[in-house]
Structures are given as structure tokens and as C-alpha cells.
Image (spheres, rainbow, N blue to C red):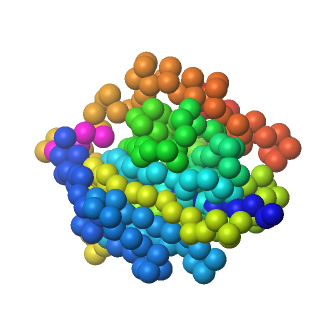
Amino acid sequence: MAKMSVLLGFFVGFVLLGLVSSRTFEELYQPSWALDHFTQEGDTLKLKLDNYSGAGFASKSKYMFGKVSMQIKLVEGDSAGTVTAFYVSVIHMSSDGPNHNEFDFEFLGNTTGEPYLIQTNVYVNGVGNREQRMDLWFDPTKDFHTYSVLWNQRQVVFLVDETPVRVHTNLEHKGIPFPKDQPMGVYSSIWNADDWATQGGRIKTDWSHAPFVASYKGFEIDACECPVSVAAVDNAKKCSSSAEKRYWWDEPTMSELSLHQNHQLLWVRANHLIYDYCADAARFPVTPTECVHHRH
């Protein structure tokens, strides 16, 4: 019997000052497609994927710097071929245009009994190909867990239940571009990606198990909101600390991981990292420049 591959993704964009905090889904987001595939049960939002359509939503505003979080309970059972995504631009956060920036969490479904994989990616000026994949230290289909992206002028940090699982550091002093000049939206969706999501596309979506349902709650955006009518350069100034104002993400403690967080990240990489583009010599015969300088 054909298996199902589902991809779930989410995108995150990001105040001491300028707080946009925990709110209801309706206050922060709006459906972007397949409204008939949305269900609200109390404080829980459910998105479903069937053989007709997936579903997705997007933030009503764009943001520059801060932290975005969602609590997600992933598709149970045979979820092969499905992808649930949370991203800032695509778990994403993303800016628009060919030179867009994007921070991705993509949750790759699997056959029953096999672990979900999380794929993260970072796009800078329209260039991605910075994938990392890992499994988790818990079953993400049994309960809600919090997935977050922290973004400031020094680093982008991907977190699972406040444990850092990836850091992308600002290396502009090495001539490497860093995403800090474009406001970003926050998005999430569920869709069929059985051409690649599970075991490289070898295992397909089993539609007899549809609908595939991902559940969400705990929507939080602690970030600097950017009006669409304001130029990007002015939003960058507005969302950066100065003598007159201080934002929490510009505090010295936010410029790098704490010692404890560093230990957490090293543990995750040692025990759960499955794929790192930096170590893929077949794909990148010349090591990507940022891989040479990143500590993690």
C-alpha cells in the first residue's frame, strides 16, 4: 500500500520595548488558502490535508527582529508524504521578492512508527540550500510543543521548547550576507510533498488515512511591527535600539547563546542531527563560506 508523505511547515518573524505578544489566531493571522480546511475547537486551530487540498495561513503584519512562537501538535499515525511548515517568510518567516529572506521549520511526515524529521533552512537574499535535518527527543504527534524563531542583528536561533536546535550567526565581517534589512511575515501550512518529503520521495502519501490534521495553539509574536507603507530602511531604524529606546533583542545577553544554551545545542547536534549541508561534500565540493566560520 502506498505510504503518505506530509510536510508541515512554519515561518517566524520577530520588545524590553514594542511588544506584540500572545494573542488569538484571529488577531495575528488570517487564512491564506483553503478556508474550508480550517477548524476551530476552543483555543485550538486545526488544519487538514486531504486529496483535494492542504491549507495555510499568514500573519496580518510584517515584523523586523524579535521572536515568533507557535505550539504545534503534528499529524498522528502514517504521515508519510506530508509536510507541516512554520516559517518566517515560509514554521516560515519570509520577506517578498527574488532577494527575499526566509527562516524555515519544516516537519517531514513519516510512516507509522518512524520518527518525524525537522528540516530547517535559511534563505538570505534569495539564496537557500542551507538545510539541516534532525529527529526529536520526543514524539511530536502526542502533545503540543513550542517551535520558535528568534531573530536579531547578531543571530537567528531556531528553538524547540526553548532548546536551541540551530544558530545562524551574523558573519558580515567575513563578507557573508545576513538578513537584517527586510521586514518578514509569519506563515504556516500543511501540504502534500510526497515527491520528496519522506525518504527522498520513495514513500508516497496514503490517502486512505486522510484527512491529515495538524493542530495549533499558543500563538505568540514578540516583535517590532512594520507598517507596509514605511520604507524598509526606515523600518530597520524603527526596530533597532538607540539612545532613546531599547529593544529586548538588542540586549547583550541576546547577542549569542548562553553557556547553558551552547551545551543544549551541542547535545542536540551530537544526538539528533541527521544531515548538515556543511558536511555534504558531494553536494558542496567547496565548503560553503559560512560553514568555515560558524562554530556550530
For this rendering, which residue is in front, 24 or 165? 24
Residue 2 appears in view: yes
Residue at the image point whose x is 42% and y is 73% from the top: 38
Tell me residue 165's x, y (percent).
Answer: 53, 35
Judge from the rendering whether residue 245 lies leftward or rightward of residue 193; answer left or right: left
Tell me residue 175's x, y (percent).
Answer: 58, 43
For this rendering, which residue is in front, 113 or 67? 113
Tell me residue 79's x, y (percent).
Answer: 64, 57
The relative height of residue 269 versus residue 60 in the rendered view (above or below) is: above
The relative height of residue 146 versus residue 189 in the rendered view (above or below) is: above
- The range drawn in magenta is 245-249
Residue at the image point whose x is 73% and y is 55% from the top: 198
For this rendering, which residue is in front, 228 or 264? 264
Residue at the image point whose x is 75% and y is 61% from the top: 3
Judge from the rendering whether residue 198 lies leftward or rightward of residue 180; answer left or right: right
Magenta: main secondary structure:
loop
- On whether residue 248 falls in the magenta region, the answer is yes
- On whether residue 207 falls in the magenta region, the answer is no
Residue 130 appears in view: no
Task: Give the total of numbered labels.
Answer: 0
Residue at the image point whose x is 53% and y is 27% from the top: 265
